[in-house]
Image (cartoon, rainbow, N blue to C red):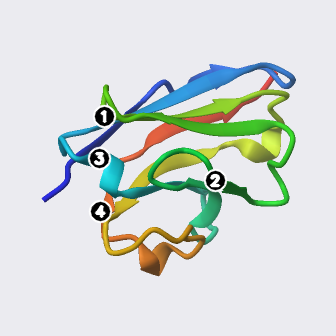
Amino acid sequence: QVQLVESGGGLVRPGGSLRLSCAASERTLSRYVMGWFRQAPGKEREFVAAINWSGSRTDYADSVKGRFTISRDNVKNTVYLQMNSLKPEDTALYYCAADGSGSWLRTSRGEYGYWGQGTQVTVSS
């Protein structure tokens, strides 16, 4: 059982930056594909970014490409989401997800078996 704990959310002005962290209880996190999703009020949970075991491959939603960067530190069992040039439409509850059933990048919420509780990001002036 993998436990995921997100942190780093908060209130930021448009154009600002935040870095989210996802700490995992699993000591072999390097065997898990990791992803970030977000859910705004009244909307479906949507894919944001994913990273493979080693960090050599990543994938992003079109809405965040060029602004967000996903990375991982398998020694620290932590995954990060660096968010730059934030917009009000980035406001959402951000979730970390993990899955260990294969090495391919996953963009669908149904493909992830483990989820954190989420951290709130609010972009507002």
Mark 3 to mark 1 CA distance (whole Å)? 6 Å
The image shows residue 11 at horizontal and vertical percentages of: 62, 22
Given this view, does label 4 or label 2 mark the residue nearer the observer?
A: 2
Label 3 vs 1, first from the N-terminus = 3
Dot 4: element = strand
User: Which residue is situated farthest in the left direction here?
Assistant: 1
Mark 1 to mark 4 CA distance (whole Å)? 15 Å
Dot 2: element = loop
Three-letter residue code for mark 1: Asn
Residues at marks 3 and 1 touching, judged by CB atoms closer than 8 Å: yes
Three-letter residue code for mark 2: Arg
Dot 1: element = loop
Mark 2 to mark 1 CA distance (whole Å)? 17 Å
Given this view, does label 2 or label 1 mark the residue nearer the observer?
A: 2
Label 2 vs 1, first from the N-terminus = 2
The image shows residue 51 at horizontal and vertical percentages of: 56, 52
Given this view, does label 3 or label 4 mark the residue nearer the observer?
A: 3
Instruction: Kindly tell me whether residue 86 is visible in this rendering.
Output: yes
Dot 3: element = helix
**Residue at the disc numbered 3:** 29
Label 4 vs 2, first from the N-terminus = 2
**Residue at the disc numbered 1:** 77
Residues at marks 2 and 3 touching, judged by CB atoms closer than 8 Å: no
Given this view, does label 1 or label 4 mark the residue nearer the observer?
A: 1
Mark 4 to mark 2 CA distance (whole Å)? 20 Å
The image shows residue 49 at horizontal and vertical percentages of: 63, 54
Three-letter residue code for mark 4: Tyr
* Corner quadrant of residue 4: top left
**Residue at the disc numbered 4:** 114
Mark 3 to mark 4 CA distance (whole Å)? 12 Å
Tell me the tag on residue 57: 2
Residues at marks 1 and 4 touching, judged by CB atoms closer than 8 Å: no
